[in-house]
Image (cartoon, rainbow, N blue to C red):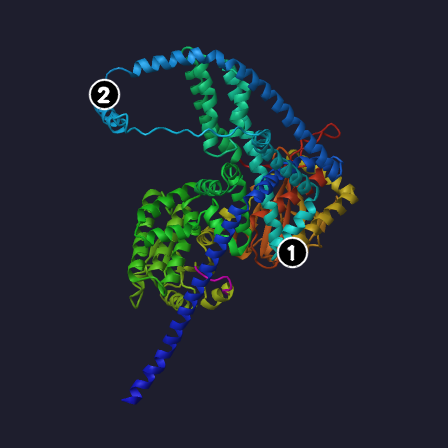
Amino acid sequence: MTQDLEPNKGAAEPLVAHGDILRSLSSLSAVRLAAGLTSAAIIIAGLFFGQEILIPLAVAFLISFALSPAIAKLERLGLSRLPAVMLTMIVVVILMGGFGLVLGSQLRALSQELPTYQSTIRSKLADLRKNLSGPGMLDGAMQTVDTVQKEVESPATHADDAPQRVSVVPAPPTPFDTAKAWLVPALAPLANAGIIFVFVFLMLVDRSDLRMRLLRLLGGNLHRSTDAMEEAGTRISKYLLMQLLVNVTYGLPMGVGLWLIGVPGALLWGTIAAVMRFIPYIGPMISTVFPLGLAFAVDPGWSMVLWTLGLIIVLEVISNNVVEPLLYGSSTGLSAISLIVSATFWTALWGPVGLVLSTPLTVCLLVVGRNLPQLQFLDTLLGTSPALDLPTRVYQRLLADDSDEALDIAQVEIERSSVQAFYNDVAVPVLGLASQDYQGQATPEHHLRVINGMETLIEALREDHTGGDAGAGKPRVVCIAGKWEVDTLAADMLAHALCLAGISADFRPASALTSRHLDGLKLDDADIVVLGYMSEQPIAAARQLCRRIRRRWPHPRTVLALLNLPESFPMEEARNAIGADELATSVNEAVERIRIMQAPARVAATPVETGDAAGKPVEPLLAHCAANESMRQDLHDLAKKTADAFGVEWAVIAIIDTRNEYIVGQNQVLPDMAFDQSGLLAIARQDGIGYHVVQRGTPIAIADIQREPSLADHRISTTLHARFYAAAPLMTSDDQVFGALCILDDAPRDITERDQELLERLADEATFLITGQSADATQAPAQGGQETATVGQKVPE
């Protein structure tokens, strides 16, 4: 009996240890949460009690961001930092002072005319009182309430018992008290303005020192801190510029419109309307009170009021629905709800000034959260980027048994791209999430919801997007699910994607493999068999299934579609071990490989028609490059700089005509290249490194060339053995492509959006070196009486 109990005791020990670990992690999370809440409370308290110092400092930061572009422009013109700052601030003070004098004169003139409007106001109020004094439904009830109120508030009837009112006569104020009462309210704003002026001057003069101190305070990764500061400055400067443009495009028509209507002080009210729009939400409403009230006082009738109201409504509609979306775009990156919450928060802390500063301050918080891992929750709370990516959103809706919303999300994505792209980028990752959760936290009910929901979604997409006559008279392709329900869904999606690509295809569910002799597969007429697996360890099962199919049907070629593999998976070794003809790791790759297997001639690169007329546009450039050794050296240096910046094996700058590709810049000598009669390294156009980007006319980036079937037999893969490829076209200002800047590496890698933008800027630099004009410059003049337009292909719209 004791021997039977001992193993159970030993088996329970890991469970106890596991429970202790969970409790420890839970207590650690609670401690971190308490520490975070305490820190947040201390920071908020410091912001509230330190507002006398922090508000001028924040306003100074805001003004310095607004003036920095002007100072930078003066420095580019040759002024040193201190004279540029002084000149900018003097100009700003003069402009503000002059504008203040003009507005002050209008305000004085308006105050002198106001008494003349009293008769108009009295007559209008009398008319309103007369119209509202007629008998109404509630007059009797209101009279009863008034009677009761008078009885309750009436004084005592006996005069002897009535209390006597005592009035306290204050002592007359001294001259010092009178001066203090006038000077203190007037000097406080002037003192704050002086402090802000000093802060702005010091921030602009000592900008580099302040930047270094902020970098030191941020600490950590210097690259990340630098990016955070640059992003914050760019976003805030752009926001302030766009806000100024929006306000001017609102205030200027407001002033002109009020002047045409005849409202006195039109310039004053237009300026107030523009300034008040710096205050979110309530500023525009407050600015409308003044012109409406004055129109009411000036015009004996109601036409001026109605015209003014109509002007305000039209300007608000145009500004909110046309001007602001056009100018703002995503300049701040803040979501709508975060703008409202931040306005409420900063107003509660700092009052009206906090309302004005709410958006720039929240932008700073957003940038800090985006670049510091410890504060990434700020990016989630404040930013416009979705909190969940698209596959996770679809998966969550399926877990909630809401396949209708999942289908709506799919339809929106398909409208932007295609059904095949949705399957490749969204649906397969959804099945990957389901596979990961199957052995973990997913309950049987959740698993069933995902399977049923995906079946409903795929069926709906099949009904809405049919393959038409795809497959008529063509070899058949059969997609076979490997083992589980998710494999069946993946095979169904792959078959549908093939039909949409014009390839006749059908699928077989995993249940068809239950027969020992595979009778349910029916592969007698199949030309290509696709084995689909969502498992992360598919080799053993795929090898067995492949052997069984080949023993029964030896003639079909096999494609192994492994759609949920980790990055470190040895894919080529797996293909050889399993014995498949081809291997694909995505829906897009599988469709492309099957297209090539079915009709290689149909997808082979077709050279552009050659001819003298077509070849002339790049001839002047080629001759210029061949004759100018200094320019070629500059292009080689640029290629070397590009390769070093991206850390890649090769960087190539090429000019491409209708027949050949000519290498005019490279960081190292490429193999199998020959000099043509012009003295430039040349190769056939279809074998060129920049051929694909010139054919597309747009930038291209391929993380792994082995996963791109169109490049499987290209020279990039066979001779250079490159795995990574990215390129940007060389084009003139009228969108004419004449070459490419390409980078290649011998290992797969990803390229970010910012890296792609950098590659495009380097391509513009290469364009300038070759043509003598920047990408946004006008066409260079013709030489020798001929057009020198460097035309390869027109960039597609």
At mark 2, the secondary structure is helix
| Pair 2/1: label in front | 2
Within the magenta stretch, is there residue 552?
Answer: no
| Amino acid found under the numbered disc labelled 1 | Gly
Residue 480: numbered disc:
none
Report the magenta residues as a range. Answer: 564-569
Q: Nearer the viewer, residue 691 or 151?
A: 151
Q: Let me know if residue 311 appears in the view.
A: yes
Q: Position of residue 125 (x, y in %)?
A: 37, 15
| Amino acid found under the numbered disc labelled 2 | Asp
Within the magenta stretch, is there residue 565?
Answer: yes
Residue closest to the far bottom? 2
Q: How many marks?
A: 2
Q: Quadrant of residue 443?
A: bottom left
Q: Position of residue 544 (x, y in %)?
A: 39, 69
Residue closest to the far front? 160
Which residue position is annotated with label 2?
A: 139
Q: Quadrant of residue 134?
A: top left
Horizontal side of residue 785 vs 717, given as left or right: right
At mark 1, the secondary structure is loop
Q: Position of residue 644 (x, y in %)?
A: 68, 54
Q: Earlier in the sequence, mark 2 or mark 1?
A: 2
Q: Nearer the viewer, residue 122 or 171?
A: 171
Q: Quadrant of residue 713?
A: bottom right
Disc 2 crowd rating (10 Å Cα; few below 14, some 14-19, many 20+) is: few
Give the answer, above or below, for where 354 lies relative to 398.
Answer: above
Gap between marks 2 and 1, in whole Å? 86 Å
Q: Position of residue 446 (x, y in %)?
A: 31, 58
Which residue position is annotated with label 1?
A: 647
Which residue is found at the position 33% from the left and 57% from the top?
A: 508
